[in-house]
Image (spheres, rainbow, N blue to C red):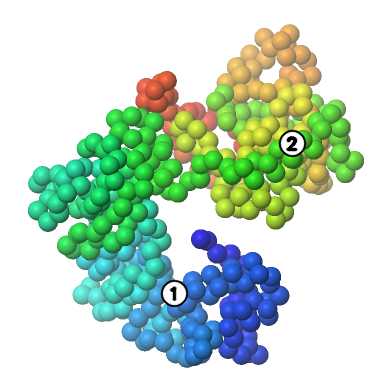
Amino acid sequence: MQVSQELIDRVLRLVHAAEYRPSKPKQIAALLELDADGYREVRRVIKQLVLEGRLIYGGNHLVVAAAAVGGPTDQIRGTFRRAMGGGFGFVRPSSGGGSADADVPEDVFVPPGMTAGALEGDLVAVTIEPSRRGGTEGKVVEVLQRARRQFTGTFFSAPLPDQPGSDTIEGPVVYLDGVHYEAPVSVGDVRGLPLQDGDKIFVEIVDFPDEESGGGEAVILERLGSSKNPAIDTLTIMRQYALPDEFSEEVLDEAREQADAFDDDVVPTDRKDLTDMLTITIDPFDARDFDDAISLQREDGRWRLWVHIADVSHFVPPGGKLDVEARRRGTSVYLPDRVIPMIPEIISNHLASLQPERMRLVKTVEIEMLDDLTITHSEVHNAAIRSDKRFNYEQIDQFLASPETFQQDWGGPICELLTHMHKLAMQIRKRRFKDGSLSMDMPDIKLELDRTGKVKGAYQTENTESHQIIEEFML
């Protein structure tokens, strides 16, 4: 379970304070004025800091700073980062992990054959040794804590012939995804699961392989399906990176309460009412969320730009079930055939989606600038808008190529707004590059899937002027 960085900082400041006296975790929680839940979190934080070598358990389970009692001068502790290919990696030392006067680099290079089977993110103990190339290098002497134990992989009833491990392992095995182990890991009892060679499975490692001799053992948690089924790719990614799936009923119930309490016909009294202002959204044709909108007013010798962002926070009470789940997920995850949302869809795709002709709550930035682009005023509002029309980038590119052909369908006010948006955005973009801004345009590849989930095509999207309009206003 991930621990709070804020609580880590509070614990370290307390323990390193001049007036601190060695205390038990329960006393530390009391000194930090934490409740029972906070005490449990403090215990997790202290355990993690002890593993990292930043704190030490003294006599009678009293917690003290590592520097207060000294530590091994020949070892440091830190997080291992494995390089892609080559078999080597680096260790970022934890503060307090070794001798105070040791000449330890910020990142310790660990050459091939010296990693002791450590995987990405593992907490390790490292000795510093002279390097044959000059300087120093590290050798992992112990993996103190594994960053993860669950992996996806490919099942076979026996090791593949003429492959590493084929002579030393018998019975069913799994070839793990995303790790450097070439040899498979034994999975022992398959528990009567209808497994066939090549199936994707989800396993937990109970005995990690040795880097030199291989081996290791895992238990099967789940059969994902045949590797010939393209839909399994998405499920494999979800399991491999521990991406959450469904929301719990208690989280969904809280989201439903928010939906029931929201009246999209009434602007809350504490919101700036911008519902009468001409407002539009521009997104990709296949966009899976609609969370930003633009308004623009032309005044005498100046522009007034309004950038609206959906106010999701209004529907997520601090400390509630929704808040806790959103913090755990951290972000929405976009996969080729689905979105794993941070917030239940009843909020993310409904209440906080800037749908046309619906009152929606937003965080709005109002920016006033002169014709020479000098900003004379800016302000942030809790506001309410009503989007007038939803566009995609292709429509706007067509409009920019031939504005007159859209007058009848879209009307004069919207066409005038789009013309003004294009003019202002291009002026801002020109000024930005003149002032030395770098263009970080990277190729964006879109995949086309058929009904079965197989890739039927791929193409590179273009960063056209319709994209640049939104980019400039968001910047």
Q: Amino acid at mark 2?
A: Ala
Count neighbours of disc 1 (C-alpha within 10 A) and say few if under 14, some if 14 to 19, many if 20 or more: many
In the rendered image, the residue lying farthest to the right is 269
Which residue sits at x=64%, y=76%?
A: 29
User: Measured from the top left, where is residue 288 in percent x and y?
Assistant: 57, 31
User: Measured from the top left, where is residue 162 in percent x and y?
Assistant: 9, 46
In the image: residue 136, left or right of residue 467 = left
Foreground label between 2 and 1: 2
How many numbered discs? 2
**Residue 416 at least partly seen:** no
Q: Earlier in the sequence, mark 2 or mark 1?
A: 1
Which residue sits at x=65%, y=23%?
A: 391
In the image: residue 180, left or right of residue 445 = left
In three-dimensional space, the C-alpha distance between marks 2 and 1, rounded to whole angstroms, equals 44 Å
Q: Secondary structure at mark 1?
A: helix
Residue 407, by quadrant, is: top right
**Residue 294 at least partly seen:** yes
Count neighbours of disc 2 (C-alpha within 10 A) and say few if under 14, some if 14 to 19, many if 20 or more: some
In the image: residue 248, left or right of residue 428 = left
Residue designated by label 1: 51
Which residue sits at x=49%, y=28%?
A: 462
In the rendered image, the residue lying farthest to the front is 192
User: Measured from the top left, where is residue 297 in percent x and y?
Assistant: 81, 31
Quadrant of the rendering where the C terminus is positioned: top right
Residue designated by label 2: 259
Relative to 346, residue 153 above or below: below
Identify which residue, 98 or 465, lies in the foreground. 98
Residue 52, by quadrant, is: bottom left
Q: Amino acid at mark 1?
A: Leu
Which residue sits at x=68%, y=41%?
A: 253
Q: Secondary structure at mark 2?
A: helix
